[in-house]
Amino acid sequence: MKRTIIRMGHPNLREIAQPYPNDKIGSQELFELIEDMRETLHYSGGIGLAAPQISVPYRLAVIETTNSQSRYGDIPIIPFTIFINPKITVLDSNQSGMWEGCLSVPNIRGYVKRPQNIRIDWLSETGQLKTLNARGLLATVFQHEFDHLNGKLFIDRIQDTTKISFDDEFHLYHQPLEQL
């Protein structure tokens, strides 16, 4: 079932999510939530969705990139993957900036600097411990989604407020400049 994605201003987006209970991993309840998140993500056209964005207060997110040349830029293909209780370890503190958008902050983008070399450790939907290293845009995607688990939005990370733009103005004034 497609769920409603809550938007900036909704207090649930600012709550720190609780760890997903180990005794519920592998449950029918979890699989129903995952299917709802898959349907919601596909309907919205996004590449990531955190449970708090649909008012579910758990440390759970899904990410799926299906096209390496997407509207988000060149990104490795990641099949639909569930991240339960994920943890990020920064492997290199060097940062790079990218224009980010968010399903919970529709029609707005902002330039955010983040570490570009990270490791993600998480549990799968069956309780298996997984690890993945991510660089570049993919590292940004993970950090963006997992920020939701800590009550953070990308706009909280914007250092230069002159680099906040509506989507239409981004396409007119910022995107072409970045391609030069």
Image (cartoon, grey):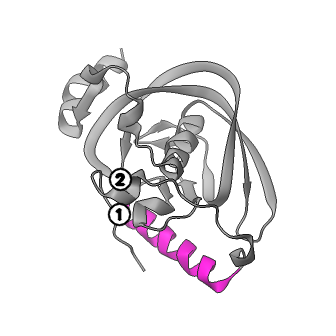
The kind of residue tagged 1 is Ile
- Residue range corresponding to the magenta coloring: 27-45
- Label 1 secondary element: loop
Q: Is residue 90 magenta?
A: no
Q: Is residue 41 left or right of residue 117?
A: left
Nearer to the camera, 55 or 79: 55
Q: Which residue is rendered at x = 39% and y = 75% of the image?
A: 2
The kind of residue tagged 2 is Leu
Q: Which residue is rendered at x = 56% and y = 58% of the image?
A: 61
Q: Is residue 150 left or right of residue 89?
A: left
Residue corresponding to mark 2: 103
* Rendered location of residue 145, percent (x, y): 51, 48
Instruction: Identify the residue at the far top of this view.
Output: 180
Nearer to the camera, 43 or 153: 153
Instruction: Identify the residue at the far bottom of this view.
Output: 28
Dot label at residue 48: none
Evaluate whether residue 68 shows in this view: no
* Rendered location of residue 152, percent (x, y): 44, 44
Q: Where the N terminus falls, by quadrant?
A: bottom left
Q: Disc 2 vs disc 1: Cβ atoms closer than 8 Å?
A: yes
Q: CA distance from mark 2 to mark 1?
A: 7 Å
Dot label at residue 5: 1
- Label 2 secondary element: loop
* Rendered location of residue 119, percent (x, y): 72, 38
Q: Is residue 37 magenta?
A: yes
Q: Which residue is rendered at x = 21% and y = 23% of the image?
A: 173
Nearer to the camera, 177 or 118: 118
> Counting other residues with Cα less than 10 Å from the Cα at mark 2, is it few (<14), some (14-19), or many (20 or more)?
some
Q: Which residue is rendered at x = 23% and y = 32% of the image?
A: 165
Q: Is residue 1 above or below residue 40?
A: below
Residue 83 picture quarter: bottom right
Of callouts 2 and 1, the N-terminal one: 1
